[in-house]
Image (cartoon, rainbow, N blue to C red):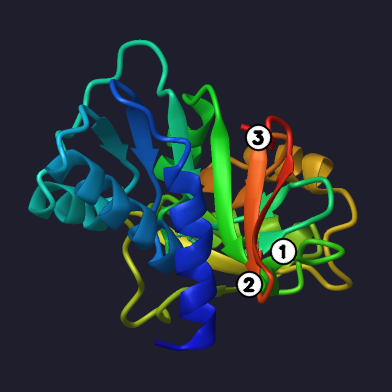
């Protein structure tokens, strides 16, 4: 296994310690979250009563294969959601969605009492925007939506290219946006993006994270709110 994969697994395994009998758990998407889902599968196989809300079709398929009971109609709150991230800043704001699942991931995180992010240390950044910011848009008149984004001074590409675009689980396109000089104010950029008709959701997760479990060569470490339990 590559070292990065070992770190991802270590972070996910640490998050598994937070899972308790009877919990409704939100399952993230991506290679780090996959380790967590596999761990939940082991807990269920061992007799723990856990149900899950998956944040993508891929995760739903994996959860079903592992015998994890799936909830699709949520009433009330999810107890604990665990997901990966592409970038994490010192305030625990995130960029997510380079795996293309951020709309459902954000819905799951927003519906959770506790949102825990699992990453290897390469995901920690001083300022968000080192890489692209994914923005999910409706395919209908998407060029108009892209023009509004360009008016904000953002440059963008259609994920997968215009000939063979990547289509999300929600049937939409992703525009991968580059913010020159990085994202100085993630909260205000998030608000500006949401004002644009045609934007379904963006990959900025501001003020949503309770705990980040970051794995480095010295092992996994929890930072943020509720990091002691
Ligand atoms: C998917 C995501 C992923 O959580 C993010 O891309 C991190 O993925 P990985 O754990 O594979 O590095 O936001 O939409």
Q: In the image shown, does 139 or 120 lie closer to the viewer?
A: 120
Residue 208, disc: 3
Q: CA distance from mark 2 to mark 1?
A: 8 Å
Spatial CA span between label 3 and label 2: 25 Å
Name the residue carrying label 2. Answer: 156
Query: Residue at 9% of width from left, 54% of height from top?
Result: 65
**Dividing the picture into quarters, in which one does residue 127 lie?**
bottom right
Q: Secondary structure at mark 1?
A: helix
The residue carrying pointer 1 sits among few (fewer than 14), some (14 to 19) or many (20 or more) residues within 10 Å by Cα, namely few
Of marks 2 and 1, which one's residue comes earlier in the chain?
1
Q: Residue at x 65, y 35 (%)?
A: 208
What distance separates the C-alpha of mark 3 from that of mark 1? 27 Å
- Give SS at disc 3: loop
N-term-proximal mark, 3 vs 1: 1
Q: Which residue is mark 1?
A: 150
Which callout, 3 or 2, points at the residue further toward the start of the chain? Answer: 2
Marks 1 and 3: in contact by CB < 8 Å?
Answer: no
* Closer to the camera in the image, 192 or 43: 43
The residue closer to the viewer here, 59 or 82, is 82
In this rendering, which labeled residue sits more in front, label 2 or label 1? 2
Query: Where's the N terminus, which quadrant?
Result: bottom left
In the rendered image, residue 104, in percent from the top left (x then y), is placed at 40, 42
Mark 2, residues whose alpha carbon is within 10 Å: few (<14), some, or many (≥20)?
Answer: many
Q: Is residue 158 visible?
A: no
Q: Are marks 2 and 1 in contact (CB under 8 Å)?
A: yes
Residue 11 pos. (x, y %): 53, 59
């Amino acid at each position: 296994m590559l070292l990065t994969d070992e770190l991802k697994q270590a972070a996910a395994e640490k998050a598994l310690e937070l899972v308790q009998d009877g919990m409704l758990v939100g399952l993230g998407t991506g290679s780090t979250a996959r380790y967590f889902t596999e761990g939940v599968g082991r807990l269920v196989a061992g007799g723990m009563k856990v149900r899950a809300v998956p944040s993508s079709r891929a995760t739903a398929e994996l959860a079903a294969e592992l015998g994890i009971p799936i909830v699709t109609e949520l009433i009330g709150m999810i107890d604990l959601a665990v997901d990966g991230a592409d970038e994490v800043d010192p305030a625990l704001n995130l960029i997510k969605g380079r795996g293309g699942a951020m709309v459902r991931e954000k819905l799951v995180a927003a519906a959770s009492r506790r949102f825990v992010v699992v990453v290897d240390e390469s995901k920690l950044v001083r300022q968000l925007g080192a890489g692209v910011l994914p923005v999910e848009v409706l395919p209908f008149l998407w060029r108009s939506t892209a023009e509004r984004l360009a008016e904000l001074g953002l440059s963008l590409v259609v994920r997968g290219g215009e000939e063979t675009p990547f289509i999300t689980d929600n049937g939409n396109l992703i525009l991968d946006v580059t913010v020159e000089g990085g994202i100085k104010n993630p909260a205000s950029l998030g608000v500006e993006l949401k004002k644009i008709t045609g934007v379904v959701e963006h990959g900025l997760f501001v003020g949503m994270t309770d705990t980040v479990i970051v794995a480095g060569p010295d092992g996994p470490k929890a930072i943020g709110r509720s990091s002691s339990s």
